[in-house]
Image (spheres, rainbow, N blue to C red):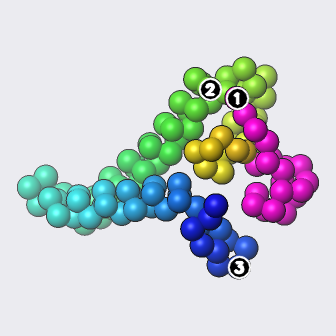
Amino acid sequence: MPVGQIGNFHLWWYGLSYTLGFLALFHGFRTVREPLGLDVPQVYGLTILIAAGVLIGGRAVEVIFYEWAYHSQHLSRIFLDMPSGPSGKFCNAQPRHKHCGQGAVRREWP
């Protein structure tokens, strides 16, 4: 269930929690940047690198440990079949699912 909606954009709890976590990380780095010897641009860069690492690393763990049987045969789909949340429901490029955007379907994964 989405937290909110603006036009066709749905805000989900899962995405909101990541966003708040990354904002808290950024605020924490800004608070302690002087003892760490960082300036503001370095704080921005470090926050973006950590956020990217969390997202890419999380996807890698998901693919390697939980979906390898499928993705080992379909490597090009690793970043196309992205989760819509922690419930294990995915969107792909076939028709008929309203929450995955125009022309997508929800698919259950083990």
Residues drawn in magenta? 91-110
Residue 32 place in picture, x, y as percent? 14, 59
User: What type is the residue that disc 2 sits on?
Assistant: Tyr
Q: How many marks?
A: 3
Numbered disc 2: secondary structure: helix
Callout 3: few (<14), some (14-19), or many (20+) C-alpha neighbours within 10 Å?
Answer: few
Nearest-to-viewer mark from 2 and 1: 1
State the separation of the CA atoms marked 1 and 3: 32 Å
What residue would you read off at disc 1? Answer: 110
Q: Residue furthest right?
A: 95
**Rendered residue at 37%/56% (across/down):** 21
Can you give x and y, in whole percent of width and height, for residue 92 in the image?
A: 80, 47
Q: Quadrant of residue 11?
A: bottom right
Does 3 appear above or below 75? Answer: below
Q: Position of residue 103 (x, y in %)?
A: 87, 58
Chain-order first, disc 2 or disc 3: 3
Locate the C terminus and report the quarter of the image it occupies.
Answer: top right
What is the x, y in percent for residue 101? 78, 62
Instruction: Tell me the kind of residue under disc 1.
Output: Pro
How far apart marks 2 and 3 lie (CA) works out to: 33 Å
At mark 3, the secondary structure is: loop
Q: Is residue 45 visible?
A: no
Q: Which residue is mark 2?
A: 66
Q: Amino acid at mark 3?
A: Gly
User: In the rendered structure, which disc, 1 or 3, sits on the residue that comes first in sequence?
Assistant: 3
Q: Which residue is mark 3?
A: 7
Residue 90 vs 14, above or below: the answer is above
Q: Residue 30 versus residue 94: which sits nearer the camera? A: 94
